[in-house]
Amino acid sequence: MAAYETDVETHKAKLADIDDESGDENTERGNWSSKLDFLLSCLGYAVGLGNVWRFPYLCYRNGGGAFFIPYCIALAFLGIPIFLLELAIGQYSSSGPFTCWKYSPIFTGIGYGMFIVSALVAIYYNMIIAWAFFYLFASFTDELPWQSCGDWSTNLCYDNVKILNKTWESCNGNNRWGKVWEANVTQGICYETGMLNKKEGVRAYLDADKAKDYFPRTLPSQEYFDNYVTGSGYSSGYDDLGGVRWQLALCYLLAFICVILALSKSIKTSGKVVYFTATFPYIVLVILFIRGLMLEGMEEGIRFYITPDLNRLSDAQVWKDAAVQIFFSLSASWGGLIALASYNKFHNDLLRDTLIVTFGNCLTSVFAGFVIFSYLGYLSTYMGLPVDEVAKSGPSLTFVVYPFAVTKMPISPLWAILFFVMLITLGVDSEFVLVETVITSLMDRFPKLRKYKLFTVMTCCLLFFLLGLTLTTDGGIYMLSIMDTYSGGWSILFIAIFECISVGWVYGIFRFLDDIKLMTGNTFCWCFPFIAFKYWWMLCWCFITPLLAAIIMVFSWVDYTGMDNGAEYDVYADLMGWGMTLVTIVCIVGTAIYVICKTGGIKEAMKPNIEWGPALVRHRREAEYHTKRYASDFVVDPWGLETASPNDVHLQSNKKGVDNEGFSNIRV
């Protein structure tokens, strides 16, 4: 028995040293330092830039407060079930998106699809963070550069358009500037001779009420964004890229350097970074909300935001927007949730984390809406325009409306700095997880890369930076729009449907629920019985969630119009976008066909791999009892690595030799 005793003592000492250093269960992959690290990482991943502009915009476009109804329904039937499903797969298998499909190898292509989606989004998402860096650096000044029209502005910039007093001024030189222009009474403008009906020829407003319908003035912040930051004002579309804007390229590089620093060592590095990046935005949002409540006209914006138009609930577009927003705001079906959960310890309460993150994310969206619309109400009063003509979607809301609003406040650079630091922190933790998803997938697929994580992170970020350089050109914003529209659209819904099918109808819904129960125990959130919600999850994963996702996809196809508007985009833009979508779908379908051919049939391709299950032997022993009810060929130690360890074998202190049952499964 001396040999056995020596092995036991050796492993005791080895594991004791490891636990003292990191407390990791899985010493090969590593674990989060604490449960809070994981929770904040998930929250930071889910809460991103879309919470600040996309949700408020969808609310006022789709009936104000009435939008909350389909949004909450989509959260319950789509968002929460998919969120929990992905956390469960990642935590149970301790594997990333590439290797977690061993429970049914035919669905391995889903992981490759997630890999592609995360990579594409990581490329263009970091460009938005680069814009925020650009604005942050520009805010360190006494007077914000977009406060008034500069040398980058056009003749229709707000300050450049002269307003004539109709009672005593005219276009023929009888004005305070002594200029001689032609008059167009119908349009209410004065224009340069020979430039009728051309916006470049407008020199003054003779009648502002008429003129704004034909040639509306643009905010200085809009022209600053178009002409100085992105250069889109000098591009006719995605096919007119122009040269690289070096200032923007440097900001883009800086954004990737931040990612490298955060992910360079292990999951513990980014786990500590999110303590700041996930909490700081809430502090700034509260400060900005308090300041917004002090602005004139803020009540108009908030009233517009929360006033419900219940008639809009009969519009299918409203329900489609709510469902799509849930997928985007929770980052479901992108692979990041699987990657994050794969670093959890086996018995983490993932049901509790699911509820905290999903509800926290949605409440953040609602609160951000109050913040943004308080400023939109102020701007509406200042410009004399309705709120729905001031606020626009996308970059215009984030990088145009608010930056201009702060120029009308005392100490405007301070408010600008706070806002753009908030945008950066909102964006970077989402970007961390997008890149981490790619890195985790590669390291799980090629384990030797774990020894060279810094090199792997730097290589991926360099590749993403080079691929994204087109986004730093004059026409880059149009390329970004194509990527945003197609890379995370239909492919996400396609992935969600197949995830539900793989768990609910192939692997076995009751087996999957038993796997979750093994990790969480009989209760979750400290007091709720697991069985009380067991059949709810079963109903969602088997029927409601995939059916709703399929309906949304069909509605999207029915309403599809493409990006071809005859100006910035043409049919080739749509073809480029469809290429991004089809790559994901081809990966899923193509890999399924390959696995079927390799295994010799569909039935074998659907059967769990011998390695499927928890990553550690001691957890596989826990799973053995319930797993063998579904699969009699389950193997506790498929790798042949089992040795006597205090974590794997419970030795009986009062018995020796073969009488000690702790040695019954030890392989010498």
Image (cartoon, grey):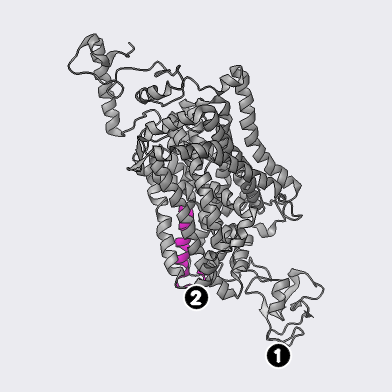
Tell me the number on the disc at residue 296. Answer: 2
Element at label 1: loop
In the picture, the quarter occupied by the C terminus is top left
Task: Give residue 651's position: percent from left, percent from top.
Answer: 24, 19
Q: Closer to the observer: label 2 or label 1?
A: 2
Which of 466 and 510 lies nearest the eye of the viewer?
510
- For the question of whether residue 144 can be seen, the reply is no
- Which of the 4 image quadrants contains residue 215? bottom right
- Inspect the magenta stretch and tell me whether residue 416 lies in it: yes
Residue occupying the far left of the picture: 654
Q: Quadrant of the N terminus?
A: top left
In which image quadrant can residue 224 be found? bottom right
Residue at image mark 1:
168
Residue neighbourhood size for the residue with mark 1, other residues' Cα within 10 Å, grouped as few (<14), some (14–19), many (≥20): few
* Residue 40 screen position, x and y as percent: 40, 46
**Image: magenta residue range:** 405-425
At a point 37% along the width and 49% down the height, the residue shown is: 275
Q: Amino acid at mark 1?
A: Trp
Q: CA distance from mark 2 to mark 1?
A: 32 Å
Q: Residue at x 71, y 76 (%)?
A: 211
Q: Position of residue 451 (x, y in %)?
A: 43, 29
Q: Amino acid at mark 2?
A: Glu
Furthest toward the right, the residue is 194
